[in-house]
Image (cartoon, rainbow, N blue to C red):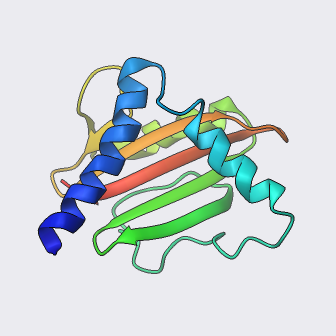
Amino acid sequence: MVHRTRILAAVAAAVLAGTTLAGCSLLPDPVRDIVDQVQESGVPNPLGSIPDDFPDEVPLVDGDVLVGLKPTDDSWTVTIQVADEAAATESTTLLEDAGFTQQFEGTGAYTDGTWLVIVQWSPIDDGGYGVAYVVTPA
């Protein structure tokens, strides 16, 4: 069961990494789609918090948490709304300042040897940017 869980987490990370690597996506824009679905629901967001056991070693940008999920025992996804693209790009600076290194030049894949973090952002319809993180063991 643990092996299957890790595979599913790796697939989720690979999808986001692939969108970053290719500059395009199997989905039109996965970050914007997540944010739009949450905003269009019209109900208070029960997912608008970071999971309690999210790794402390992984820094997140400051902003409004739109989605915080733990899809498997050892993976997390968090989407945060920030004011602008400068705030979104701060996500990579925070990771690098915390000792994470970029896995492949030009991608949003970072690791510190313990955690693999995929980070991606895009503009959202009501203004600002959505910054999406997927975190799994390295």
Q: Nearer the viewer, residue 51 or 40?
A: 40
At horizontal 29% and vertical 20% (from top left) the residue drawn is 105
- Residue 44 is situated, as x and y percent measured from the top left of the image, at 81, 73
User: Which residue is depicted at the point 65% across and 62% down?
Assistant: 65
126 left or right of 81? right
Answer with left or right where residue 80 lies relative to residue 2. Answer: right
- Residue 56's x, y, as percent? 37, 68
Nearest the eye: 36 or 85: 36
Name which quarter of the figure residue 123 lies in: top right
Does residue 29 appear left or right of residue 36 in this picture? left
Q: Is residue 92 above or below residue 6?
A: above
The answer, for residue 98, to whether it is visible in the render is: no
| Figure label count | 0
Figure quadrant of residue 124:
top right
Q: Position of residue 50 (x, y in %)?
A: 54, 70
Residue found farthest to the bottom: 52
- Image quarter where the N terminus lies is bottom left
89 lies left or right of 39:
left
Q: In the picture shown, does residue 75 fall above or below 118?
A: below
| Residue 13 seen in render | yes
Residue visible at 39% across and 19% down in the picture: 22
Q: As displayed, is residue 17 above or below residue 63?
A: above
Q: Name the residue: 50% across, 68% down.
A: 69
Q: Quadrant of residue 118?
A: top left
Residue nearest the viewer, comparing 15 with 107: 15
| Residue 112 percent location from the top left of the image | 22, 49
